[in-house]
């Protein structure tokens, strides 16, 4: 190996640095080689892939050794080694030669993980608190032209539907589900693969897992269903642990009036979860979503991707997603219908909080009605802080991009017939803080 320092940078696999859940057996590698001087370029490369860091060297790489490839190519270099396995971590490095034929040393090792490639890899079951069998609407049987009331379906429109849909009233509350388990020995690696439909928040021992928001993304759920992957290796406790998941209404299960508006009914909120644990001894174990989970209704009585959220803080159950919580009064979950789409590890950047803003001004156009001007149109939500809550009293948060001349927000002009509002009922304590859990809005004005 050459003693010349390696200058490669921005090493990626499938456009991502050290991804943990690639859903392809032929990932592509990328790197930059900023050689000093004008017109310089790479003349050759050698790429190594191994199943462990210890094997990542030219004599032992057990997955792929490309050998010296005479090429200036440094993007979309496709893997061509032994077949990759599901739920594994792999390590890779690259050596390059400059246009003068001088070899550089190998770069620092990089890594990538794999998803669950095959349907047979999934042992988890779809669960929820909805009925085991529910009507499912063909997403192509209804469109915006079917709404005689404009942006939402009317009673007359429902009468034209088949009886199983005309008389069906979806559950609008958000369920919260939990599962406790114990670790029998020290762990080496833990990955959880999870999908929640329509939207979900996953927690472990009372703490939110991941920084994604508004998950799961919209797809044609008969063709593709995205799932998320999280590394829990450093987050699991020795001994008792609890997984919690909050489910809500998204594009999979919108309110009945929005079935024509890119959100036809596929089923009640449900989840699929599989935690893969590898112990230091080599033993493996799975924690899966199944009939042993427990569920109850959360404080969210309305969860809708378009209308917003109704939240009654008086109904909170402190520590519901922590190990010490007593769930003996909770009910068993139901096994529910399986979405028909192919389970696919999310292959794009998820929604995340990118910035936070304070209002630039506040007005009171009517007594007790306060309008906050955010200074820009944004996609997001608000955080409400109440120094001293009044038990049972409800605060309403409404969103709009426009104002009337009298200073009130012009909600219908910017939101159509979507409510775009949150109703928060206070529990009556000091320093209450509320953020909507699942919905999202587009707004510039808030009252």
Image (spheres, grey):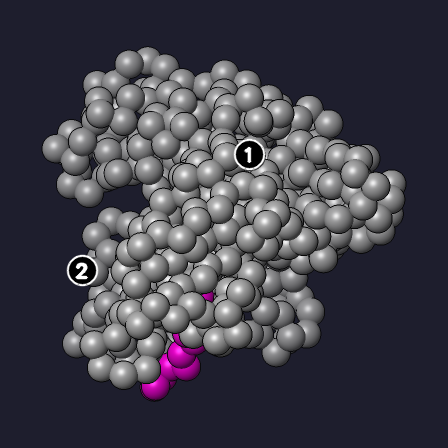
Q: Quadrant of residue 378?
A: bottom left
Q: Residue furthest front?
A: 101
How far apart are the alpha carbons under marks 2 and 1?
53 Å
Residue located beneath label 2 in the image: 413
Q: Earlier in the sequence, mark 2 or mark 1?
A: 1
Quadrant where the C terminus is found in the figure: bottom left
Residues shaded magenta: 353-365
For label 2, the SS is: helix
Q: Which is more toward the observer, 267 or 231? A: 231
Category of crowding for the residue at label 2, using alpha-carbon neighbours closer than 10 angstroms: few (below 14), some (14–19), many (at least 20): few
Q: Is residue 329 left or right of residue 4?
A: right
The residue positioned 35% from the left and 26% from the top of the image is 222
By secondary structure, the bulk of the magenta-drawn segment is best described as loop
- The percent coordinates of residue 345 (x first, y second) are 45, 40
* Circle 2 or circle 1, nearest the eye: 1
Label at residue 85: 1
- Side of 308 where 82 appears, left or right: right
Judge by depth and name the residue closer to the eye, 41 or 354.
41
Left/right placement of residue 410 relative to residue 370 reads: left
Task: Give the percent coordinates (x, y) of residue 227.
Answer: 48, 40
Residue 402 shown in magenta: no
Q: Is residue 7 left or right of residue 275?
A: left
Residue 398 in sight: no
Q: Position of residue 382 (x, y in %)?
A: 44, 68
Residue that protrudes farthest toward the bottom in the picture:
361
- Rendered residue at 50%/24% (across/down): 119
Q: Mark yes or no: residue 6 visible.
A: yes
């Amino acid at each position: 190996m050459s003693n010349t320092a390696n200058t490669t940078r921005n090493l990626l696999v499938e456009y991502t640095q050290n991804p943990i859940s690639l859903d392809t057996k032929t990932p592509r590698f990328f790197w930059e080689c900023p050689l000093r001087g004008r017109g310089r370029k790479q003349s050759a490369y050698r790429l190594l892939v191994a199943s462990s860091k210890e094997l990542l060297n030219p004599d032992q790489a057990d997955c792929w050794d490309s050998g010296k490839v005479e090429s200036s190519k440094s993007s979309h270099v496709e893997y061509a080694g032994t077949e990759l396995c599901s739920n594994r971590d792999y390590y890779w490095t690259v050596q390059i030669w400059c246009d003068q034929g001088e070899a550089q040393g190998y770069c620092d090792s990089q890594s990538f993980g794999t998803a669950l490639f095959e349907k047979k890899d999934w042992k988890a079951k779809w669960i929820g608190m909805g009925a085991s069998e529910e009507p499912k609407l063909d997403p192509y049987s209804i469109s915006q032209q079917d709404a005689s009331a404009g942006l939402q379906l009317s009673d007359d429109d429902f009468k034209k539907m088949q009886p199983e849909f005309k008389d069906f009233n979806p559950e609008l509350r958000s369920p919260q589900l939990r599962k406790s388990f114990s670790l029998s020995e020290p762990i080496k690696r833990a990955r959880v693969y999870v999908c929640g439909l329509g939207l979900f928040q996953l927690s472990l021992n009372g703490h939110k897992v991941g920084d994604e928001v508004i998950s799961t993304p919209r797809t044609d759920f008969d063709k593709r269903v995205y799932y998320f992957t999280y590394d829990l290796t450093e987050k699991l406790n020795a001994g008792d642990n609890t997984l919690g998941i909050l489910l809500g209404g998204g594009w999979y299960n919108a309110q009945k009036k929005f079935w024509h508006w890119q959100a036809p009914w596929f089923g009640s909120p449900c989840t699929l979860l599989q935690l893969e644990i590898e112990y230091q001894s080599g033993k493996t174990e799975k924690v899966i979503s199944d009939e042993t989970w427990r569920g109850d209704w959360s404080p969210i009585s309305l969860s809708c991707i378009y209308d917003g959220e109704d939240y009654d803080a008086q109904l909170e159950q402190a520590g519901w997603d922590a190990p010490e919580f007593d769930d003996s009064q909770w009910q068993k979950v139901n096994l529910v219908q399986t979405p028909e789409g192919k389970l696919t590890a999310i292959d794009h950047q998820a929604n995340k909080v990118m910035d936070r803003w304070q209002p630039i001004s506040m007005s009171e156009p009517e007594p007790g009605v306060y309008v906050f001007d955010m200074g820009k149109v944004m996609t997001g939500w608000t955080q409400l802080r109440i120094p001293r809550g009044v038990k049972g009293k409800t605060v309403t948060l409404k969103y709009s991009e426009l104002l009337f001349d009298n200073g009130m927000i012009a909600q219908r002009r910017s939101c159509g017939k979507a409510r775009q509002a949150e109703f928060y009922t206070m529990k009556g304590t000091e320093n209450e803080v509320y953020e909507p859990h699942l919905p999202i809005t587009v707004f510039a004005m808030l009252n």
